[in-house]
Amino acid sequence: MAEISDILIIGGGIAGLSAAAALSEQARVIVLEAEEQIGFHSSGRSATMLHYFLGDRLVRELTLASRGFFEDPPDGFTDAPLGHAMPVLIHAREDEREELDQLEADIALFARMDRLDRAGVAELCPLLKDDARYGIADRNGFRLDPHALLQGNLRQLRNHEGELHEKARVASIKRANGCWQISTERGDVYSAPILVNAAGAWADAIARLAGVRPLGLEPKRRTIITFDAPPGIELDGLPFAKTVGEELYFAPESGRLFASPMDEVPSEPTDAQPDEYEMALAAHRMEERTIVKVERIHSRWAGLRTFTPDRHPAVGFAPDAEGFFWLAGQGGFGLQTSPMMARIAASLISGNAWPINDVTEAELSPGRFFGQMA
Ligand SMILES: Cc1cc2nc3c(=O)[nH]c(=O)nc-3n(C[C@H](O)[C@H](O)[C@H](O)COP(=O)(O)OP(=O)(O)OC[C@H]3O[C@@H](n4cnc5c(N)ncnc54)[C@H](O)[C@@H]3O)c2cc1C
């Protein structure tokens, strides 16, 4: 016998769980997650920062509209804070100054930035070398707690009588009698009129299983290493520090430092593992830009950031299959945009009012990849 619900969501990452929490207010929702634990893939492997230096205007609008949720979550969502304050510093050498000026102009609408000279950069981040001559700082940066965020969404789902089924890898998807019929590898069967595809790097594979046209998603691997800070450096108060170009970021992490060479290596959807080359590159760039010597890599991980062809997320019903809803392509900003993305999904599925003024349905519509408007 099939288990019947109003909405089935494939994927127990931040996209699937935040949408589930929002949708379960008005519908019976079941989330199917292939792994034994939520957030096992991208959502558990991120740099966990909320900042405005990612993506373009649309991503910044979604981030800005999500921020209030993290600072003041709804009643009953969580007992733990969803993050803590951490300044964000973008630093530049002389030859990068123009790029910094342009970025500052782009960000001005979204965050109040302080312009820093060499002394200001050194005061905020004493680890940077002298050639970090210019900086812009967002003193209101926010470091997210992905565990609290995932658990909070799960709690909301359960409070609304929704369910999460783990170790439920979807193996087949068919449409029959106005419903999606889904079977898992273990042989469990589910049925619902609406299927939300929040399978992260696997979202195109899920579409193919359902006979739906894929979007051309590109999963890209990103690597992070952790290592010791130099003795005597006070880690509390250090910023999330990023080069103005896509070269390096680093920040304090559980009594050490973490760094990423901001790699974007094309990958199959998989349990991503760090590669020696990118780990060495992270250490090299850290030593190039800072006074830190990376003597020993303490830990390392990699995760996939999955992009649509225009690097904007895809949220909306598939133009070619009734009841098939895309929630994919969150790239490197899926945590920090998740509250607004979930509200947008709930608006399109449950008919709630459109929740954001400066982003249109057409900009997010999956149909844009097939020459169709929302
Ligand atoms: C190194 C790194 C740094 C990042 N830094 C930031 C940051 O600072 N800020 C930010 O906001 N974002 C950041 N991101 C991006 C963010 O992590 C992602 O955008 C977000 O996690 C995507 O969430 P998701 O739910 O779509 O994907 P996932 O978390 O990967 O979830 C998809 C889920 O679908 C499941 N699934 C797949 N196939 C099936 C199937 N057949 N059946 C059942 N389940 C299935 C998978 O098991 C998986 O759990 C970073 C990512 C990485 C890798």
Image (spheres, rainbow, N blue to C red):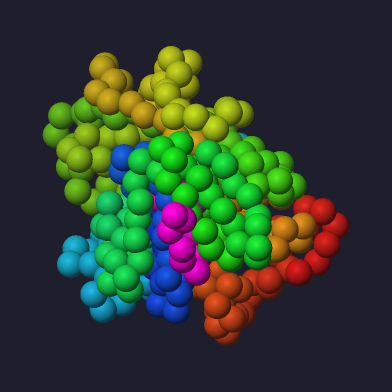
- Of residues 147 and 336, the one nearer the viewer is 147
- Residue 35 in percent (x, y) is at 37, 39
In percent of the image, x 61 and y 62: which residue is there? 179
Can I make out residue 77 in this image? Answer: yes
- Of residues 82 and 111, the one nearer the viewer is 82
Q: Is residue 295 above or below residue 91?
A: above
- Residue 258 in percent (x, y) is at 32, 34
Q: Which image quadrant is residue 201 in?
A: top right
- Of residues 49 and 174, the one nearer the viewer is 174
Say if the magenta span includes residue 8.
Answer: yes
Can I make out residue 22 in this image? Answer: no
- Residue 176 in percent (x, y) is at 65, 57
- The answer to whether residue 64 is left or right of residue 365 is left
Residue furthest to the front in view is 1
- Of residues 324 and 99, the one nearer the viewer is 324
Residue furthest to the left in view is 232
In percent of the image, x 58 and y 72: which residue is there? 349
In percent of the image, x 83 and y 62: which residue is there? 372
Numbered marks: total: 0
Residue furthest to the bottom in view is 353
Magenta stretch bounds: 1-13
Specify the quadrant that holds the N terminus.
Answer: bottom left
- Residue 171 in percent (x, y) is at 53, 39
In percent of the image, x 76 and y 69: which residue is there? 374
Q: Which image quadrant is residue 69 in?
A: bottom left
Say if the magenta span includes residue 94.
Answer: no
Q: Is residue 176 above or below residue 280?
A: below
Q: Is residue 267 above or below residue 322?
A: above
Q: Is residue 300 above or below residue 321?
A: above
